[in-house]
Image (cartoon, coloured by chain):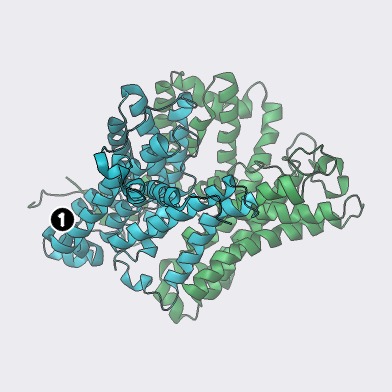
Chain colours: A green, B cyan
Amino acid sequence: MLKLEKRPSPSQFWSRATPVLAVVLTMIAGGVMFAVLGKDPLVAIRTIFWDPLFGEFAWYLRGQLLVKAGPLILIAVGLSLGFRAGIWNIGAEGQYIMGAICGAAVGLAVYPTDNRLIFPLMVVAGAFGGWAWAMIPAILKTKFNTNEILVSLMLVYVAQTVLAMASTGFLRNPEGAGFPGSRNFSSYPAAANPELIAGSGLHWGGVAALGVVVAGYVLLQRHILGFHIKLSGQAPRAARFAGVSPPKLTVLCMGIAGALAGMAGLFEVTGPAGQISIDFNVGYGFTAIIVAFLGRLNPVGILLAGLLMALTYIGGEMASTNLGLPSAAIQAFQGMLLFFLLACDVLTNFRIRLAKREAV
Amino acid sequence: MFGSIDPTFLIASLMVAAVPIMLAAIGELVVEKAGVLNLGVEGMMIIGAVVGFVTAVQTGSPTLGFLGGALGGACLSLMFAALTQVLLANQVATGLALTLFGLGLSSLIGQSYVGVRPPLMGDVPFGPLADLPWVGRILFQHDPLVYVSIGVVALVWAVLKYSRAGLILRAVGESHDAAHALGYKVRRIRVLAILFGGAMAGMGGAYLSLVRVPQWVDGITAGAGWIALAIVVFASWKPWRVLMGAYLFGGITVLQLNLQAAGSRIPVEYLSMSPYVITILVLVIMSSGRGRAALNAPAALGQNFHASR
């Protein structure tokens, strides 16, 4: 019989090694899944993880990496602060949508004015939209003790109907012949978010993501607020004695996560997506939860995890066009990754020992 | 506003609409009474929906479909049990993983079943009872699962309140250390509760794809699992209130669908967001100061148990 013995403190080594182990295990389990689907597992894994970086079309696909990783990293860093403090904001998808709508609305309101301040203003509006949407669960939690998990998730569905209203109603392109969807931002340079270096895939969202990683690192390692966040997660009682106010921390963590998700939504809608449409959101808000955990709730880890997750998106698309692998397979693959990660985490917190058989 | 909607029909269809969330919520109630917070209800429901659908189409039997759905939900919940009870993973994160994985896997399994018609389930033959005016239409013209779901609520209530097994389950949920000290197998009891919750969620999901919709669509649950979780809070962990909550939400869903169909002046978008907004409102009312929901929660809810001695 095996027995778990709690470690006095989490193992540093295993904390770094589990994500790698989880990725390897997911590749194996994913390979089995692909084999069941009738695809050659080795070819499938190579198509997903190798070809986008070093294959025939790598020159194009490498750029896509930053396009997909940007929003994931931006959202995941925000979420990780809350997760560390035990505040479970899982409605980032809704905050992402509302940020995109608010930011785009500001840009479309002044169309076709040309001014250098328009885009920065839109970014602020996007952050505000996400922040405001995140404030609903945060304030309900602090004032009425409502479960923030359920409320933030319910608000995703509400945000999706607001998005449908926006793209068929108040933000619809007046010159779009009645089709749903807003004006395309690529034909409105003052509000567009183009590629900054041709072929790199880097737009302002990617720049913001890198900035947020640095800021998040500094916050957690060098700032009293980061210490309070970590303290409330690991020892809530001690945190209260140290003068940390749980309601303030809830509002702050949810607000930061919401604002970052909103910004990510705006960068997406003005850049790669191009316009507000009923289905411009592709679930980054949910995938970012996986990214946050895979990155060990650590900004630098999240940077790497975001790039890896972006790779599975691109590789998954490649595999679905080249090998006919269903696109849903990659979603299951990403979910599996979180499973294995959580399972491997046992090694971080526990030692596995042989135990004598006990009386049953 | 309600002019063109027949109230008898409305009540009859709300009983049908309530079945999936009622089954999922009563399962989750048992899980939470055992002190485990499984946030993967949505994932287990959708897996139940797809597995049940595939089983029913392949065998031609809706009954086997429901059993298949329950089995599918239970299998997925077994993964949750392994992670949280054996490997002691964080319950919130594992529940989310279950949902994300379930959504992906379900659309993978179901992709070749889009547009297929499932075998339909007939109503329970109540003979002359079904012809009674009003009452017959409301109570005696339903498929068996409507009665099964009410039966499950009654069973859970009776077991939790009157049986020794129910007492042990509640003890594990209130204080796993005390239950362990008394010699109860905390882990085994919790795993069984999780399996029951998974089976109920799976059966509820199968009801969506086999009766309520009835076909396979990606993301068919559309948040029903999360609403079921909210209903458990709304019910303050009391089985009969789950029944009430499920009928309340079934009623809202049916009413908003009927208003949409009747061409109400309220815009469609406001109607379709109403179940989610009302869920939030209900949560606020139940959780705030004078609603005693929070006080009634099992004391060990969401905490992992590691027997150090």
Task: Pick whichever, B51 or A240, lies toward us.
Answer: B51
Image mark count: 1
Amino acid identity at mark 1 = Lys
Residue B213: image quadrant is top left
Above or below for A249 versus A189? below
* Residue that badge 1 annotates: B185
Label 1: state its secondary structure: loop
Residue A204 placement, left or right of B165: right
Where is residue B166 drawn, in percent x and y?
A: 17, 59
Which residue is located at x 42 percent, y 51 percent?
B8
Dot 1, how many residues are within 10 Å of its Cα: few (below 14), some (14-19), or many (20+)?
some
One can see residue A178 in this view: yes
Above or below for B118 versus A160? above
Above or below for A188 versus A28? below
Q: Which residue lies furthest to the left in this view?
A: A359
Above or below for A257 versus B78? below
Task: Pick whichever, A77 or B256, lies toward us.
Answer: B256
Task: Pick whichever, A352 or A360, lies toward us.
Answer: A360
Which residue is located at x 39 percent, y 22 percent?
A36
Chain letter for the residue marked with disc 1 in the picture:
B
Q: Which residue lies furthest to the right in this view?
A: A114
Task: Pick whichever, A21 or A136, lies toward us.
Answer: A136
Where is residue A197 drawn, in percent x and y?
A: 80, 39
Where is residue B152 drawn, in percent x and y?
A: 25, 50
Where is residue B240 drawn, in percent x and y?
A: 29, 61
Residue B67 placement, left or right of B101: left
Q: Tell me the quadrant of the picture where the N terminus of chain A can be found.
A: top left
